[in-house]
Structure formats: structure tokens, C-alpha cells
Image (tube, helix red, strand yellow):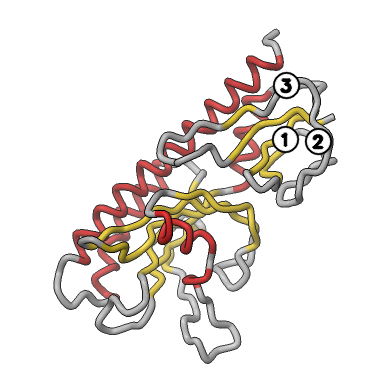
């Protein structure tokens, strides 16, 4: 039987590989979006040509990506102040998800104030956000979002993103961790629980339990400036 240290490191590596593949796919989506934005007078309809790229991402990720698309910075398009070109995989089909982008509406979805949009816009780097409840999004559900900037000349013109399945992440975590007597949690840099093998630490809650034995093991993701997730042994 593998030692706890070996299992923690192998689980972290496996999770990191899943995330790296997502960010690699988002790099392709960002490149395709940049190509579209280089055309003068870009309109919302031109972003519809990204659907095959998103379709490929969803299918290749095998259940890890629930939805994906691009969100444009205000004032870039000729026919809309903002635009959220987003598709979800529903019932075996990729479906465009309309969002309420009217600032005067009570159900206004202001993606420009979402952390997954703000962070890559500010840092110029890929980011991993969540878990969080996406109020006003497609389904008001708990999600993790991977996102990265889309460049247009010298500026960041949009953000390419993908919502990740919490169920997939939990299954991957448990499958690689295996049956252990120790309580192990996967937590974010802010202390939120992403997954665990104990009912004491529910996903989305803040981890406040004592840590025992090993130091935290980071989940390595080459695209990110620093590991946002860590595996810890909970007392």
C-alpha cells in the first residue's frame, strides 16, 4: 500500500494534469478569439464562429468542462456595450446560454464584476476561481471557473473561460486518493474546500479544521503563477 505522502503527491499531480489540459484548451480558444477581434468592426455575431472550438473543448475534456466561452470587455464591439458568448453542454448538445446584459434590469448579469473576469484582466495571466455560486449565471450553481486573458494588440480585449464540473473534480480526487483512514481536503488559496473524503468538510465551505502530519501538497498547474489548490491532511 502506498504511503500517505505518495498518495497526496500522486493525487495532486493527477488533478494538476486535468487543469493543465483545460488551460491549454483555453489558450486555443483565446487565440481564435484574437483572430476574430483583429477584424475591424467586430460584432456579436462574429463570435458565433467560436462554437466548434468550444464544442471541441467540451468533448475532449470528457465531462470536466460544463460550459465555456468568451466575455468581451466593455466598448469593444460595434453593436453591444458588453457581450457574454457562452455555451453549455446540455442533454448531449452544446447550447448557447443567453444572459441578461441590460444594466437597467433587476436580473442584470454583470460579468465585468465577476472575479473570474476581473483577475485575468488585471493580472494578464490565467486564473482559477471558485468554488462559488454563480448567481445570475446559467443555473445558479456552484462552479469553479478557469479563465485567461484574450489579447487584442497591446490590450486585453476579452476573457476566455470554462466552468468546471464540481462532480468531476470530486470523483477525480477520490479516485486518485483511494480509501484512506485519514481525512484529506482539497482547498483553495483562500481556504475554501473544493473536495474532501470526509462529510466534515463540505465543498464550498471554508476549511477551519486543524492540520496534522504532512505540510500541504500543492496542485501543480504550469499555466498559473502559483498553485491555487493544495491537498491537506485534516485532523
Say which residue appears at 20% left-offset and 64% top-offset. Answer: 36
**Callout 3: SS:** loop
Q: In this view, does 156 lie above or below 13?
A: below
Q: Quadrant of residue 157?
A: bottom left
Mark 2 or mark 3, whichever is nearer to me? 3
Image coordinates for residue 215, horizontal then vertical, percent: 70, 25
What is the count of numbered marks? 3
Q: Residue under circle 1?
A: 185
What is the C-alpha distance between the residues marked 2 and 3? Answer: 18 Å
**Callout 2: SS:** loop
Q: In this view, does 157 lie to the left or right of 221?
A: left
Marks 2 and 1: in contact by CB < 8 Å?
yes
Q: Residue under circle 2?
A: 198
Q: Sequence order check: which comes first, mark 1 or mark 2?
A: 1
The quarter in which the N terminus is drawn is top right
**The residue positioned farthest toward the bottom in the image shown:** 104
Q: Is residue 47 above or below residue 74?
A: above
Amino acid at each position: 500500500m502506498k504511503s500517505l505522502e505518495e498518495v497526496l503527491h500522486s493525487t495532486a499531480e493527477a488533478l494538476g494534469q486535468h487543469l493543465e489540459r483545460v488551460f491549454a484548451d483555453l489558450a486555443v480558444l483565446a487565440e481564435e478569439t484574437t483572430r476574430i477581434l483583429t477584424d475591424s468592426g467586430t460584432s456579436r455575431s462574429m463570435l458565433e464562429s467560436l462554437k466548434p472550438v468550444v464544442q471541441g473543448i467540451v468533448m475532449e475534456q470528457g465531462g470536466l468542462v460544463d460550459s465555456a466561452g468568451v466575455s468581451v470587455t466593455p466598448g469593444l464591439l460595434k453593436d453591444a456595450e458588453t457581450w457574454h458568448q457562452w455555451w453549455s453542454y446540455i442533454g448531449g448538445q452544446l447550447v448557447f446560454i443567453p444572459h441578461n446584459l441590460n444594466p437597467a434590469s433587476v436580473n442584470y448579469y454583470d460579468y465585468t464584476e465577476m472575479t473570474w473576469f476581473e483577475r485575468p484582466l488585471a493580472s494578464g495571466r490565467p486564473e482559477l476561481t471558485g468554488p462559488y455560486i454563480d448567481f445570475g449565471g446559467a443555473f445558479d450553481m456552484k462552479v469553479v471557473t478557469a479563465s485567461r486573458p484574450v489579447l487584442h494588440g497591446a490590450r486585453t480585449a476579452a476573457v476566455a473561460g470554462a466552468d468546471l464540473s464540481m462532480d468531476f473534480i470530486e470523483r477525480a480526487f477520490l479516485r486518485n486518493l483511494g480509501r484512506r483512514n485519514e481525512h484529506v481536503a482539497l482547498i483553495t488559496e483562500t481556504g475554501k474546500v473544493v473536495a474532501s473524503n470526509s462529510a466534515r468538510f463540505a465543498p464550498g465551505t471554508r476549511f477551519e479544521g486543524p492540520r496534522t502530519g504532512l505540510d500541504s501538497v500543492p496542485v501543480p498547474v504550469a499555466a498559473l503563477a502559483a498553485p491555487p489548490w493544495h491537498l491537506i491532511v485534516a485532523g
